[in-house]
Image: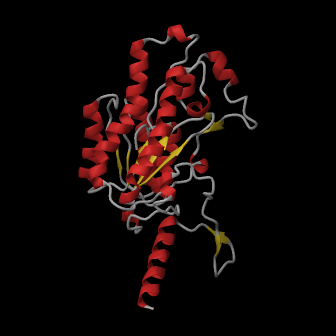
Amino acid sequence: MTGGDSGIGHAVAIAFAKEGADVAIAYLEEHSDAEETAELVREEGRRCLLPPGDLASREQCRTVVDETVREFGGLDVLVNNVATQQELDSPEDLTGEQWMRTFDVNIHSYFRVTRAALPHLGAGAAIVNTASVNGLRGNKSLIDYSATKGAVIAWTYAMAQALAGRGIRVNAVAPGPVWTPLIPATLSPGHVAKFGQQCRWGARRSRTSWHRPMCSSRRAGCRRTTPVRCSPRSAARPFRRDHRPTPPRADSTTGKAVRVRFSEICQMRSASSSLRRRE
């Protein structure tokens, strides 16, 4: 996962760990945030790798994939989440340097990390890209950021079609306002004070309980399958409107609802398929 030290990435890393996945978090330089996330992942009994570095660099994009494969012995899920933004007062304030920096981090790193990861991703693997509502609607204060998020959405559609034949699912999420450390660090105080007010419920704070994992590791017994039902045809449709969190089941002894782990579902599906083949 890129950009997993804080915000949405922090929440998703913990959620993946709860489902049995070992997690590698590529981050820039926020070492204390990354260590906090890693500690929470390890509390779930999973391993966590923390390769720091600037993903605007081609070399670093290759390095984080190589280190992850070397440490974990493989790769099942790639989450492209890293992003940067800088608020502008007018289009004339947007310099060429800022434009290139934003594209290097927000979309070029997605391409470069994915390209390095593809040789390690087999049938049943998944790629998840973080886009933004700004990529759909634009934002006059975040012109370059909006452009990169629009590129992420189009690239996701294209990659989903290109990789469907290999059994690799490519999806994207396009969140609305989410309160993360990036907001006060990159927006003006006036904008921060009103952030999310245009939404009915305001900006969501990035918390683990609000981010459901889309995939789990085969090392949790899933054998490269995921809880999201997705055929090669639907893999070309990256925005799923019908996904719902796993429903609870009733414990046979207490009658209380308990959560079913995604890894259990994968194992039950595998056993059911074996029975049908024998019949």
192 on left or right of 108: right
- State how many labels appear: 0
Name the residue: 58% across, 30% down.
Answer: 134
Q: Residue furthest bottom?
A: 279
- Vertically, is 205 above or below 161? above
Quadrant in which the C terminus appears: bottom left
- Vertically, is 226 above or below 273? above
Name the residue: 56% across, 35% down.
Answer: 132
Q: Nearer the viewer, residue 12 or 114?
A: 114
Look at the image and tell me whether residue 190 can be seen. yes
Q: Position of residue 200 (x, y in %)?
A: 76, 36
- Vertically, is 23 above or below 61? below
Q: Position of residue 42 (x, y in %)?
A: 41, 52
Instruction: Residue 251: name its quadrant.
Output: bottom right
Quadrant in which the N terminus appears: top left
Q: Nearer the viewer, residue 84 or 182?
A: 84
Q: Nearer the viewer, residue 178 or 71?
A: 178
Q: Position of residue 107 (x, y in %)?
A: 41, 33
The chosen color scheme is secondary structure
Q: Position of residue 227 (x, y in %)?
A: 51, 63
